C-alpha cells in the first residue's frame, strides 16, 4: 500500500478510518495521539509533558513529535506502507517528515465543526480493553458499560466541550494550512466524512491506494 497520511479536524474519524485501512491493507497504523496517551498511562517523562498540552487542546513541540515518529517509521513493518494518523499537524512537521520519508497520498476527511463536537462529546472508551463507543452512533448494550469486558466506560480528558473547542482552534490555526500545502504538491485527496463509518471507508478505499 501507499504511504498514507490522514488529515482532518479532531473527531473527523481519522482514528476509526486509520484502523480500518490498516486492517484492510495489512499495514501498520501509526497514531501519534495513541503513542502519547500510552505514555500518559505509563507515567513516563514524555507522558507527563504530553498530558498538560493535550488537556489544554494544544500541540506538543514539533521537534519532540518528529523524534517519536522518526523512530517509529524506522521499524521494518513500515517498509510496505503505513497509515499515519496525527502527524503532520504543522507545516514544519510536514517539511521535516519529507526529510524522513516520501508520502504518496494525503487523505483529508472533511466534516463540519458541529458534527465533530457531537462526535467527540459522545465518544466513550473502555479503559481496560480499549473498545470504542459513541453514546448515539455506537452505543453499548448497557449505558456506559463495555460490552466486551463489563468495565465502566470513560471519556477522554480532552473530550470535554471546552477542550474540544480549543482543539478545533488549534486545528484551524496550525493544521488546516496543510490542506493547501499538500494540494500544491498534488497529493491531496479530500473525501466527505459525513455518513456511516462504512460509507466513509468505502470512499477512502475507492481512491487509488495500491502502490505500483
Ligand atoms: P489525537 O489523538 O490525534 O486527536 P485528534 O486529532 O484530536 O483526533 P481524535 O482522536 O479526537 O479524533 P479522530 O479524528 O481520530 O476521530 P475518531 O475516529 O476517534 O491527538 C490528541 C492530542 O495529542 C492533540 O490534541 C495534541 O495535543 C497531541 N498531538 C498528537 N499528535 C501531535 C502532533 N503531531 N504534534 C503535536 N501534538 C500532537 O472518531 C471520533 C468519534 O466519532 C468516535 O466516537 C467515533 O466512534 C465517532 N465516529 C467516527 N466516524 C464516525 C461516523 N462516520 N459517523 C458517526 N460517528 C463517527
Image: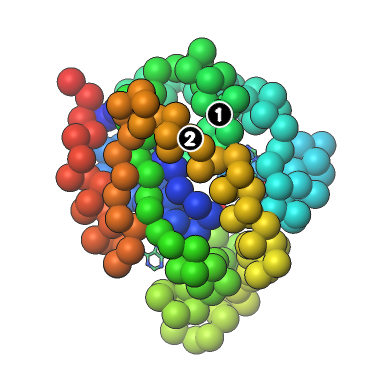
Question: Would residue 137 be found to the left or right of residue 2 on screen?
Answer: right
Numbered disc 2: secondary structure = helix
In x, y percent, where is residue 126? Answer: 57, 67
Could you classify mark 1 by the number of other residues whose Cα lies within 10 Å: few (under 14), some (14-19), or many (20 or more)?
some
* 3D distance between C-alphas at marks 1 and 2: 6 Å
Which of the pair 120/174 is nearer the observer?
A: 174
Name the residue beneath numbered marker 2.
Answer: 178
Residue 44 in view: no
Question: In x, y percent, where is residue 153?
Answer: 60, 73
Foreground: 138 or 184? 184
Is disc 1's CB within 8 Å of ligand 1?
A: no
**Residue holding disc 1:** 91
Question: Tags 1 and 2 in contact by the CB under 8 Å rule?
Answer: yes
Residue 1 image position (x, y, % from top left): 27, 29
* Residue toward you, 171 or 46: 171
Indicate the quadrant containing the C terminus: top left, top right, bottom left or bottom right: top left
Q: Residue at x 20, y 30 (%)?
A: 210
Q: Is residue 28 left or right of residue 99?
A: left
Secondary structure at badge 1 equals helix
Amino acid at each position: 500500500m501507499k504511504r498514507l497520511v490522514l488529515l482532518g479536524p479532531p473527531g473527523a474519524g481519522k482514528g476509526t478510518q486509520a484502523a480500518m485501512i490498516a486492517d484492510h491493507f495489512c499495514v501498520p497504523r501509526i497514531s501519534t495521539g495513541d503513542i502519547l496517551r500510552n505514555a500518559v498511562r505509563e507515567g513516563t517523562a514524555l507522558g507527563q509533558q504530553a498530558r498538560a498540552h493535550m488537556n489544554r487542546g494544544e500541540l506538543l513541540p514539533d521537534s519532540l513529535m518528529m523524534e517519536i515518529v522518526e523512530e517509529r517509521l524506522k521499524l521494518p513493518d513500515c517498509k510496505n506502507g503505513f497509515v499515519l494518523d496525527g502527524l503532520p499537524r504543522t507545516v514544519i512537521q510536514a517539511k521535516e517528515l519529507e526529510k524522513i520519508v516520501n508520502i504518496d497520498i494525503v487523505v483529508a476527511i472533511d466534516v463540519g465543526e458541529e458534527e465533530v463536537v457531537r462526535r467527540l462529546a459522545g465518544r466513550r472508551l473502555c479503559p481496560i480493553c480499549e473498545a470504542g463507543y459513541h453514546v448515539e452512533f455506537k452505543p453499548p448494550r448497557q449505558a456506559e458499560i463495555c460490552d466486551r469486558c463489563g468495565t465502566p466506560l470513560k471519556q477522554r480528558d480532552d473530550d470535554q466541550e471546552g477542550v474540544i473547542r480549543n482543539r478545533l482552534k488549534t486545528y484551524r490555526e496550525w493544521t488546516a494550512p496543510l490542506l493547501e500545502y499538500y494540494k500544491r504538491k498534488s497529493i491531496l485527496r479530500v473525501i466527505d466524512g459525513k455518513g456511516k463509518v462504512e460509507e466513509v471507508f468505502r470512499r477512502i478505499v475507492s481512491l487509488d491506494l495500491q502502490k505500483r
